[in-house]
């Protein structure tokens, strides 16, 4: 979890490959209207995020019913969003990809092919309620090499699930 540009998809895919768990990108579950709003530079409110979070929960419940583990890249900016995700009938863990706005702005300027415009980053930081201190959460500093971020995320996941 984290703001746009923090590396959720990259780290999630890497964790999926490293653990053998299925990976899904939560962005793929956004309703088309949400994507259109974000593309146009409009930030999403709680009401717009509600069906998206419900879709992630439904997808996770399918994995649980099949006996599978799932890694999901999802911003989960507010505690209420994380609590909705925690409604799944198994433990849910969060890896918070934590970085400064300046670092992430630089990354977003170099990112190609994503619907989220960099001008919405400020609103994501405004909405972000740090999960540090919540049960089942580890924080990973993203101001390091991709390899180190991924390794720290895997180490943190192992600690959470031990």
Image (tube, helix red, strand yellow):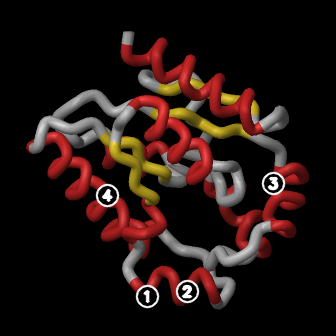
* Distance between mark 2 and mark 3 Cα atoms: 21 Å
**Residue 54 in the figure: left or right of residue 137:** left
Task: Tell me the distance, in whole angstroms, between the alpha carbons under discs 1 and 3.
Answer: 25 Å
* Callout 3: SS: helix
Q: Earlier in the sequence, mark 4 or mark 2?
A: 2
Q: Residue at x 25, y 49 (%)?
A: 60
Q: Earlier in the sequence, mark 2 or mark 3?
A: 2
* Residue that carries the numbered disc 1 in the rendered image: 33
Residue that numbered label 3 is attached to? 104
Nearer the N terminus, badge 4 or badge 1? 1
Indicate the secondary structure of the residue bearing disc 2. helix
* Residue identified by numbered label 4: 56
Image label count: 4
Which of the two discs, 4 and 2, sits closer to the camera? 4
Q: How far apart are labels 2 and 1 at the CA level?
A: 6 Å
Q: Residue at x 55, y 86 (%)?
A: 37
Q: Quadrant of residue 111?
A: bottom right
Q: Position of residue 153 (x, y in %)?
A: 59, 28
Give the Cα separation between the discs numbered 4 and 1. 16 Å
Label 4 neighbourhood size at 10 Å, few (<14), some (14-19), many (20+)? many
For label 3, count other residues whose C-alpha is less than 10 Å away and answer few (under 14), some (14-19) or many (20+).
many
Counting other residues with Cα less than 10 Å from the Cα at mark 2, is it few (<14), some (14-19), or many (20 or more)? some
Label number found at residue 37: 2
Which mark is on residue 117? none
């Amino acid at each position: 979890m984290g703001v746009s540009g923090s590396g959720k998809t990259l780290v999630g895919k890497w964790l999926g490959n490293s653990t053998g768990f299925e990976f899904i990108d939560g962005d793929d579950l956004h309703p088309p209207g949400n994507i259109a709003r974000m593309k146009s530079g409009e930030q999403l409110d709680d009401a717009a995020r509600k069906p998206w979070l419900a879709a992630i929960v439904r997808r996770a419940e399918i994995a649980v019913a099949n006996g599978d583990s799932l890694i999901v890249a999802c911003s989960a900016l507010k505690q209420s969003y994380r609590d909705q995700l925690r409604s799944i009938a198994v433990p849910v863990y969060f890896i918070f990809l934590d970085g400064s706005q300046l670092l992430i702005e630089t990354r977003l300027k170099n990112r190609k092919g994503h619907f989220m415009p960099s001008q919405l980053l400020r609103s994501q930081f405004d909405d972000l309620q740090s999960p540090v201190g919540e049960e089942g959460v580890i924080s990973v500093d993203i101001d390091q090499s991709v390899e180190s971020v991924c390794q720290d995320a895997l180490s943190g996941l192992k600690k959470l699930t031990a």
